[in-house]
């Protein structure tokens, strides 16, 4: 019994010592984060489609299917989107279905923290952004979510690479 008490005291002491040592080793954060990146500058430029995928959210497997062949054949220029800093955009498409309109104006839902890309052509088109777009990023993912009775059933992801 005495050995058990000593063992418990030693275990408690060792745990307390480990906590003190680990808690005391936190580095201090110094410096400034700096100015946030300009998201308009981040998306400005020409983007060429490099992949097109579909995910059926109703499928129990939730597999992602690569449907790039509908846009990319190795001969014609793939879908290109050009976003200008003045808020206009245009589309160059030779192969595949046009989900982006003929061109028009664009904006973000929130310029500081964008989640959605809004395109104003003959209709208003709203797409989810697949991630932050900073001036030095060379990849852009745009998600088109198809809904049925208010529930997203299919997600199309357009993956683009910055051309300039």
Image (tube, rainbow, N blue to C red):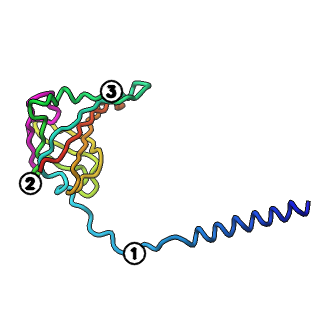
Residue 50 lies in quadrant:
top left
| Residue 143 place in picture, x, y as percent | 27, 38
Considering the numbered disc 3 on the image, is that residue within a helix, a strand or a loop?
Answer: strand
Judge by depth and name the residue closer to the eye, 150 or 161: 161
Residue at which label 2 appears = 86
User: Along the polypeptide, which appears first: circle 2 or circle 3?
Assistant: 2
Residue at which label 1 appears = 30
Considering the numbered disc 1 on the image, is that residue within a helix, a strand or a loop?
Answer: loop
Q: Could you tell me which quadrant the N terminus lies in?
A: bottom right
Considering the numbered disc 2 on the image, is that residue within a helix, a strand or a loop?
Answer: loop
Magenta region: 88-104
Residue at which label 3 appears = 148
For the residues marked 1 and 2, what is the alpha-carbon distance in whole angstroms? 37 Å
Image height of 100 relative to 106, above or below: above
Q: Are marks 1 and 3 in contact (CB under 8 Å)?
A: no
Q: Which residue is at the far front?
A: 74
Q: Residue at x 26, y 58 (%)?
A: 112
Q: Residue at x 8, y 42 (%)?
A: 90
Does 97 lie within the magenta span? Answer: yes
Does 4 lie within the magenta span? Answer: no
Instruction: Indicate which label's residue lies in the foreground, 1 or 3.
Output: 1
Judge by depth and name the residue closer to the eye, 158 or 89: 158
């Amino acid at each position: 019994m005495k050995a058990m008490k000593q063992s418990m005291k030693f275990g408690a002491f060792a745990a307390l010592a480990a906590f003190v040592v680990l808690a005391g080793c936190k580095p201090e954060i110094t410096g400034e984060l700096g100015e946030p990146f300009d998201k308009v500058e981040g998306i400005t430029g020409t983007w060429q489609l490099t992949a097109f995928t579909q995910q059926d959210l109703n499928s129990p497997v939730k597999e992602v299917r690569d449907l790039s062949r509908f846009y990319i054949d190795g001969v014609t220029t793939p879908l290109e989107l050009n976003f200008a800093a003045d808020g206009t955009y245009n589309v160059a498409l030779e192969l595949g279905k046009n989900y982006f309109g003929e061109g028009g104006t664009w904006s973000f839902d929130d310029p500081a923290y964008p989640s959605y890309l809004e395109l104003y052509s003959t209709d208003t088109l709203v797409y989810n952004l697949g991630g932050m777009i900073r001036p030095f990023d060379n990849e852009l993912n745009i998600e088109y979510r198809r809904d049925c009775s208010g529930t997203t059933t299919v997600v199309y992801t357009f993956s683009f690479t910055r051309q300039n």
